[in-house]
Image: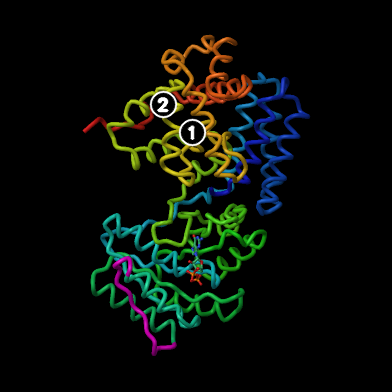
Amino acid sequence: MVLAELQGSIIGALQQLQHATIVDDKVVNECLNEITRALLQADVQFKLVRDMQTNIKNVLATQYGSAGHDKRNNIKKLVCNELCKILDSGKPSFTPKKEKPSVVMFVGLQGSGKTTTCTKYAYYHQKKGWKPALVCADTFRAGAFDQLKQNATKAKIPYYGSYMESDPVKIAVDGVERFKKENRDLIIVDTSGRHKQEAALFEEMRQISEATKPDLVIFVMDSSIGQAAFDQARAFKQSVAVGAVIITKMDGHAKGGGALSAVAATKSPVIFIGTGEHTDEFEEFNVKSFAERLTGIGNLSGFVKKVQEVVPIDQHTELLQKLLEGKLTLRNMYEIYQYNLEMGPTSQILSMLPGGAELMPKGEEKEQQRKIKRRMILMDSMTKQELDSTNPKLMNESRMMRIARGSGSQVKDVKEMLEEYKRMANMLANTKGLTKKGLKIPQNR
Ligand code: GDP
């Protein structure tokens, strides 16, 4: 699960607000300090974190005296907005247009996942109807061309490279020319990386860039490089006109905070993240849903999209309709748990729901699955009326005792599950009207 640990810490800190009877300065400061610590531990640059804390405090100071409940939700939103601000470069990335061939050049250090990502990027666009082609201008690393060739062949994408030519600029120019003649509309140039940032690498990048005049330069960064992210990203930006960032290996044990720093350093948006070694393990990056997931606010539109992708249409319409209307029964929650188990731990489907991420223990997917199964066993002991009710008063002590006995668990487990349900139901109720904002549910075929 991407950034699970950071997510767990931020949500944990925000939960302290929910549990506090009074949200006074002390509670707010403790919460913000914990979020600060979590971000620093996740390798987000110190200055960014400090600015974020200052901004939140400044806004809160102007809202002094607002009611406790609003304050809790407000702080959550402020944290989310600040994370968006860090991640939002302020300018949209160039998107290739089909009318004219676009040249996209990839840069990054050796081992960052550049060659793999070139193919992922090509494959992603090919599935959307583009005619991509790959050019290997990496003559520095032995085997780079073979690797690209292998990846491209598997994905059925035309490629160009040379075993004989040692001038990467010539290869890049020849490859781009050739594919332009062949009417390919997305020409991707893989350049060489080196073990470390050095003058020769930057000079080569500059020359290739000058010769091929790319429409977009993508900087590829390994998410596990930690605090070095900011400096590395800036060094690349200073040498070539980086216009977008792709962060790789987000599936690993990366702390991932480097992503936030890279955006700040390059003033360019993260457009995709790599989530595995396979060509299709590649996700479009959306700032808002990423920040919402990190703060547990949930990402209903992402959830709807995911369900639409994976679940047969006639099985999900009713559930989605209820979610979008902001109504949630325990039966709906049972269904969501079921989807989560079916789609597998990496689907992150639960974390997209408002309050859903709070179910996730820090980075422990197996524990999350076990917890969900325990919840479902509890629900199996509930009556039809209990499952379909939206009346919180229905669940009295004697019903809870019956459910606990029936499922071989304790009353406190039932209470915990009901609390979780209430929290999710409340948060969903707050999202009422999403359908009006253009989120549509397809009708049954
Ligand atoms: P390059 O030297 O920058 O071209 O890097 P490569 O494309 O050769 O990738 C280096 C290693 O990282 C390879 O073993 C890739 O399979 C692996 N890799 C690339 N992207 C990802 C990713 O998103 N997740 C994981 N787990 N591995 C990746």
In which quarter of the view is residue 178 placed? bottom left
Q: Circle 2: is it few (<14), some (14-19), or many (20+) Cα within 10 Å?
A: many
Magenta region includes residue 312: no
Q: Which residues fall within the magenta stretch?
A: 154-166
Magenta region includes residue 159: yes
Q: Which secondary structure type mostly characterizes the magenta part of the structure?
A: loop
410 shown above or below 75: above
43 shown above or below 289: below
Q: Is the shortest distance between ligand 1 and the CB of mark 2 under 8 Å?
A: no
Q: Which residue is mark 2?
A: 323
Residue 138 percent location from the top left of the image: 45, 79
Q: Circle 1: is it few (<14), some (14-19), or many (20+) Cα within 10 Å?
A: many
Residue 424 percent location from the top left of the image: 52, 26
> For this view, does 333 lie left or right of residue 15?
left
Residue 254 percent location from the top left of the image: 60, 56
Q: Which residue is mark 1?
A: 353
436 shown above or below 196: above
Disc with the residue nearer the chain's start (2 vs 1): 2
> For this view, does 299 lie left or right of residue 363?
left
> For this view, does 71 lie left or right of residue 179?
right
Q: Amino acid at mark 1?
A: Leu
Tag shown at residue 370: none
Q: Residue shown at 45%/15% (left/top)?
A: 383
Residue toward you, 444 or 114: 444
Q: Is the shortest distance between ligand 1 and the CB of mark 1 under 8 Å?
A: no
In which quadrant of the rendered image does the C terminus lie?
top left
Secondary structure beneath disc 1?
Answer: loop
Dot 2 and dot 1 residues touching (CB under 8 Å): yes
Q: Residue shown at 69%/41% (left/top)?
A: 35
